[in-house]
Image (spheres, rainbow, N blue to C red):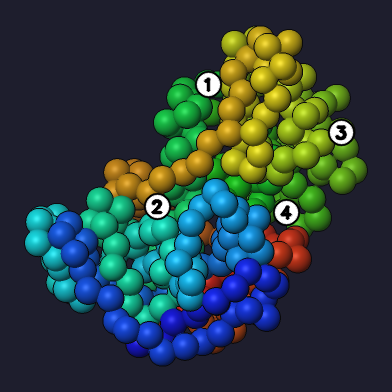
């Protein structure tokens, strides 16, 4: 089968399209014939060697954290899914390929009103949004949440999920992203390149940090006492958390069918709409990664693997 691989850390020039062995599903795994995958910022961080020593990968490595496609075969112990099902899934690598073996627990049926390209673009945003809003944030109806990066691939879905949960949603964005975040239901949107959010926002129950850096540091002052600041990009300062009497932590998102099914239900109810910035071919993976690395995109970049 064809797959994107790299054999050393570096820039996008290390990426190549190769022929590799087709995987076989083990116990509690399914084999997916991949229709589409997407490019996530984590893909480039891993490729650059940022996590060398923290995350062990075997070279040559097939990147990719999400996939949509059709169940080709199933391993022993699989009970929820069957051959022929249209599914989307999260995985720790291996999805930039024609086939990928994934745990059944990390896989769900795609939303009935989505095609496979659209479903692929939802995996990481749905999993991340559930992890931060429901699991970590314990967001309740009537609470206020501030989402930094509200027009990005993850942020745009998070805004919609937060609204579906009944929250008052404030987002930060820039350029065309301001209008996009408003159109997705955000109650207030702040252009972070023209406005200082700390002068416009106060006493929020929850801040979701998808930006890091100075944005994260300044966010402490807008959270009410007893509130939470959750970051997807860097560990927040414990000293500042104590100073402001809030909970602040870095979180990572693990895929599960429960999270995907929760999101899929909202999609089918029309409460979440996808945002795709660009659709490209698997063979264009290097170019696609550079595009995402450059930033400024509103929505996900999808890599089509098979029609």
The disc, 4 or 1, on the residue closer to the chain's N-terminal end is 1
Where residue 142 is drawn, which disc sits there? 1
Question: Which of 44/255 is in front?
Answer: 44
Question: Which of 100/36 is in front?
Answer: 100
The disc, 3 or 1, on the residue closer to the chain's N-terminal end is 1
Mark 4–mark 1 distance (CA, rounded to whole Å): 25 Å
Q: Kindly report which numbered mark, 4 or 3, lies closer to the viewer in this rendering.
A: 3
- Mark 3 lies on a secondary structure that is loop
Tell me the residue that label 3 is attached to: 196
Tell me the residue that label 4 is attached to: 177
Tell me the residue that label 2 is attached to: 267
The disc, 4 or 2, on the residue closer to the chain's N-terminal end is 4
Mark 4–mark 2 distance (CA, rounded to whole Å): 21 Å
Question: Which of 39/25 is in front?
Answer: 25
Residue that appears at 74% across and 61% down: 295
Q: Position of residue 103 (x, y in %)?
A: 26, 57
Q: Position of residue 246 (x, y in %)?
A: 63, 15
């Amino acid at each position: 089968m064809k797959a994107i691989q790299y054999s050393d850390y570096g820039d996008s020039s290390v990426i190549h399209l190769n022929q590799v062995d087709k995987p076989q599903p083990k116990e509690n795994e399914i084999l997916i014939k991949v229709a589409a995958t997407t490019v996530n910022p984590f893909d480039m961080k891993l490729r650059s060697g940022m996590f060398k020593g923290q995350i062990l990968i075997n070279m040559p490595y097939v990147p990719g954290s999400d996939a949509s496609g059709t169940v080709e075969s199933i391993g022993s112990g699989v009970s929820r899914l069957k051959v022929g099902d249209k599914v989307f899934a999260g995985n720790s690598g291996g999805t930039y390929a024609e086939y990928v073996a994934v745990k059944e627990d990390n896989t769900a049926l795609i939303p009935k009103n989505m095609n496979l390209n659209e479903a692929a673009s939802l995996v990481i945003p749905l999993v991340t949004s559930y992890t931060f809003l429901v699991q970590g944030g314990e967001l309740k109806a009537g609470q206020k949440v501030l989402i930094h990066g509200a027009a990005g691939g993850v942020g745009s879905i998070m805004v919609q999920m937060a609204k579906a949960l009944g929250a008052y949603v404030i987002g930060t964005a820039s350029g065309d992203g301001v209008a996009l975040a408003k159109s997705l239901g955000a109650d207030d949107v702040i252009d972070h390149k023209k406005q200082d959010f700390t002068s416009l926002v106060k006493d929020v129950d929850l801040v979701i940090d998808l930006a890091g850096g100075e944005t994260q540091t300044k966010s402490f002052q807008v959270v009410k006492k007893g509130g939470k600041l959750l970051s997807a990009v860097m560990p927040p300062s414990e000293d500042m958390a104590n100073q402001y009497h809030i909970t602040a932590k870095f979180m990572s998102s693990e895929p599960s069918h429960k999270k995907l099914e929760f999101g899929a239900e909202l999609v089918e109810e029309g409460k979440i709409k996808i945002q795709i910035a660009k659709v490209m071919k698997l063979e264009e993976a290097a170019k696609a990664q550079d595009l995402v690395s450059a930033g400024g995109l509103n929505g996900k970049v999808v890599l089509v693997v098979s029609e």
